Image (cartoon, rainbow, N blue to C red):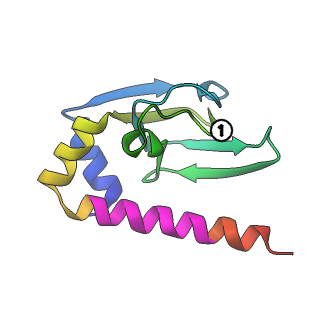
């Protein structure tokens, strides 16, 4: 089972939202109290006034800082590029997911690590 499969299983028990293409999911500076798991579609994360961005796809998570940082403020914007289905996970739901499927945490770390490496490669001059 991969991260997307785990998120789909959690979607049966969790809160799933549909976000139409072009709609903002969150805005820089907002309070963050949940993490998002992208079930379907594509989301663009942008920061520094749109000076940099990253497009993420189904199986990726975003907004994870909200689960680990007290009084978290969103660092950038998240906008649906296509119509999206998104799993919303607060800290309690995330901990439940990790308890039920411990590999979920490792899969998410691997996904985030891969995304950070890709961003690093994009910024080399």
Highlighted range, magenta: 105-117
Q: Tell me: 87 left or right of 94.
A: right
Q: Is residue 65 above or below residue 71?
A: below
- Residue 28 horizontal/vertical position (percent): 65, 31
- Please state the horizontal and vertical placement of residue 90, each as a whole percent of the image: 32, 33
Q: Quadrant of the N terminus?
A: bottom left
* Magenta stretch contains residue 85: no
Which residue is located at x 64 percent, y 51 percent? 55
* Residue 102: quarter of image: bottom left
Question: In the rendered picture of this protein, how many numbered marks are placed on residues?
Answer: 1
Q: Residues within 10 Å of mark 1 (few under 14, many from 20)?
A: some
> Residue 101 is drawn in which quadrant?
bottom left
Q: Is residue 7 above or below residue 89?
A: below
Circle 1 residue? 76
Residue at point 53%, 51% (across, down)? 57
User: Is residue 110 in the magenta section?
Assistant: yes
Foreground pick, 116 / 30: 30
Can you name the residue that lies furthest to the front here? 70
Give the percent coordinates (x, y) of residue 8. Answer: 28, 45
Q: Position of residue 71 (x, y in %)?
A: 45, 31
Q: In the image, what residue occupies the spot 63% across and 24% down?
A: 23
Vertical order, 74 against 116 (above or below): above
Tell me the chief SS of the magenta region: helix
| 77 left or right of 86 in image | right
In the rendered image, the residue lying farthest to the right is: 125
Relative to residue 30, is residue 3 drawn left or right?
Answer: left
- Residue toward you, 35 or 30: 30
């Amino acid at each position: 089972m991969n991260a997307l499969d785990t998120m789909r299983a959690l979607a049966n028990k969790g809160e799933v939202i549909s976000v139409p293409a072009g709609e903002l999911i969150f805005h820089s500076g907002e309070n963050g109290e949940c993490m998002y798991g992208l079930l379907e579609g594509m989301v663009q994360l942008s920061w520094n006034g749109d000076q940099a961005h990253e497009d993420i796809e189904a199986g990726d998570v975003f907004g994870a800082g909200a689960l680990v940082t007290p009084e978290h403020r969103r660092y950038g914007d998240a906008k649906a590029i296509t119509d999206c289905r998104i799993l919303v996970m607060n800290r309690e739901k995330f901990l439940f997911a990790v308890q039920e499927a411990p590999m979920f945490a490792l899969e998410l770390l691997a996904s985030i690590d891969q995304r950070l490496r890709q961003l690093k490669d994009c910024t080399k001059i």
